[in-house]
Amino acid sequence: MHSVYIVFHDNGDSSIQAKNEAISWLDENGFSNPHSFYGHGKADWFVVGGRWSGMFTELSDEYQRFHERAKNFIKENYPELLADTFSDEGLGIRGVSFGNKETSKKQKKAKEKIKEMWDKEGNKTSCPLLRDSCGRWIVGIDNAPKEDIDDAQKLDKDIFEKLKKEYGDIEVVVVTDAFGGEERLMKDIDYEEIKDKWAVVIDYHF
């Protein structure tokens, strides 16, 4: 199973550095320890972003408006992509594959059109709808697009409050030093204690 986790920490002058710092801290503190004979951490492996890549962007009002436009586009032009999905969050283009070759071709065309729509609006990161949920920052290996800075950022209060509302029951850790931190639920975090910290999205498997 997969779950989302957030690391709040102070280190790094950029999103890329903040991601690497979060990976190092989790690794050094045994968050994932699949090679131990006796012991085991919270996860058997983890990635930065993963299935939740772009979650901070998705909480923004700007993205919600884009998602609605994208949804209308899919409904009008590729309705079959939505017919067999349980949720319209991914619009039949993220997190789903089709056995039917014709539907797969239409999905590919739909992705291309959504990318055009996203890029035309001048967005600086890749569209969350088009991200590969498996091809992100895998424990210590930098294999994610550098421009996707939104999986590690300093949250403004609006996004923070939406995060508490939508993801209040997820676990987070507020790092205190190299080998210490306070693990709590997101709903118990106060904005003042993390407003100057990096928030890094972690997808972990257990």
Image (cartoon, helix red, strand yellow):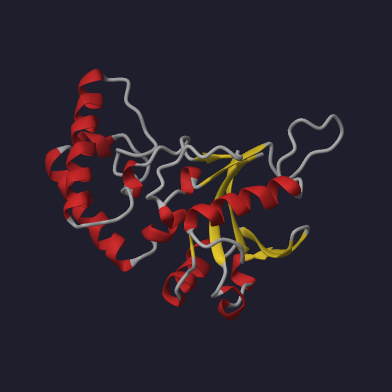
x%, y% of residue 73?
Answer: 16, 47
Q: In percent of the image, x 56 and y 61: which residue is there?
A: 12
**How many numbered marks appear?**
0
Q: Residue furthest bottom?
A: 192
Quadrant of the snapshot with the C terminus: top right
**Quadrant of the rendered image containing residue 2:** top right
What is the x, y in percent for residue 128?
35, 49
| Image location (x, y in percent) of residue 99 | 32, 20
Q: Is residue 61 above or below residue 108?
A: below
Would residue 105 be found to the left or right of residue 15 on screen?
Answer: left
Q: Nearer the viewer, residue 151 or 164?
A: 151
- Asked if one can make out residue 79 in the rendered structure from this viewpoint, the answer is no
Front one among 105 and 22: 22
Outermost residue on the left side: it is: 76
Left or right: where does residue 199 sit relative to residue 118? right
State the residue lying farthest toward the front.
13
Residue at x 46%, y 35% (from the top left corner): 135
| Residue 201 vertical position relative to residue 198 in the rendered view, above or below | above
- Quadrant where the N terminus sits is top right
Give the residue at x 61% y 66%: 10
Q: Does residue 175 appear left or right of residue 191 in this picture?
A: right
Is residue 189 among the parts visible in the rendering?
A: yes
Residue 166 or 23: which is nearer the viewer? 23
Q: Position of residue 103 (x, y in %)?
A: 23, 26
Residue found at x 60% / y 43%: 204
